[in-house]
Image (spheres, helix red, strand yellow):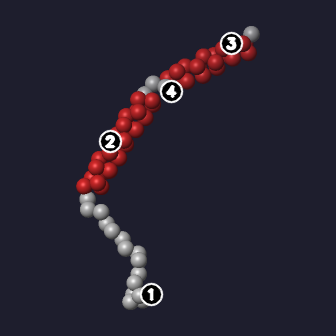
């Protein structure tokens, strides 16, 4: 009898903690991901407005290796 009551109490406690865990975490995570996506979009837009940097790795015969 005691074991049944204790098991029922433990199961109720476990169920309530699982139900409460889903409250604000999903909304907070969604808000964080939306903010991150917006930041990435702003960064890409800023980088596209800059002049591209050209790197020429081709060496001619007059260039000496250091």
- Of circles 3 and 1, the one toward us is 1
Disc 3 element: helix
Pick the residue in front: 18 or 37: 37
Cα–Cα gap, marks 1 and 4: 62 Å
Give the residue displayed 29% in from the left and 54% down from the top: 48
The N terminus: image quadrant: top right
**Does the residue at mark 3 contact the one at mark 4 (Cβ under 8 Å)?**
no
> Image quarter for residue 52?
bottom left
Residue 19 on image: x %, y %:
52, 21
The residue beneath circle 3 is: 5
Tag shown at residue 65: 1
Q: Secondary structure at mark 2?
A: helix
Query: Residue 63: image x %, image y %?
Result: 39, 87
Q: Residues within 10 Å of mark 2 (few under 14, many from 20)?
A: few
In the image, residue 36 sits, relative to residue 31, either above or below, namely below
Residue placed most toward the observer, 47 or 23: 47
Q: CA distance from mark 1 to mark 2?
A: 45 Å
Residue wearing tag 4: 21
Q: Report the disc number at residue 8.
A: none
| Foreground label between 2 and 4 | 2
Counting other residues with Cα less than 10 Å from the Cα at mark 1, is it few (<14), some (14-19), or many (20 or more)?
few
Compared across the picture, whether 46 is left or right of 28 comes to left
Which comes sooner in the sequence, label 2 or label 3? 3
- Mark 1 or 4: the one toward you: 1
What residue appears at the point 41 percent right and 33 percent down from the top-left corner? 30
Mark 3 vs mark 4, CA separation in Å: 24 Å
Pointer 1 with pointer 2, Cβ within 8 A: no
Q: Earlier in the sequence, mark 3 or mark 1?
A: 3
């Amino acid at each position: 009898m005691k074991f049944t009551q204790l098991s029922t109490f433990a199961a109720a406690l476990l169920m309530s903690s699982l139900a409460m865990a889903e409250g604000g975490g999903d909304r907070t995570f969604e808000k964080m991901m939306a903010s991150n996506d917006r930041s990435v979009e702003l960064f890409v837009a800023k980088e596209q407005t800059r002049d591209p940097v050209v790197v020429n790795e081709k060496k001619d015969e007059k260039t000496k290796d250091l």
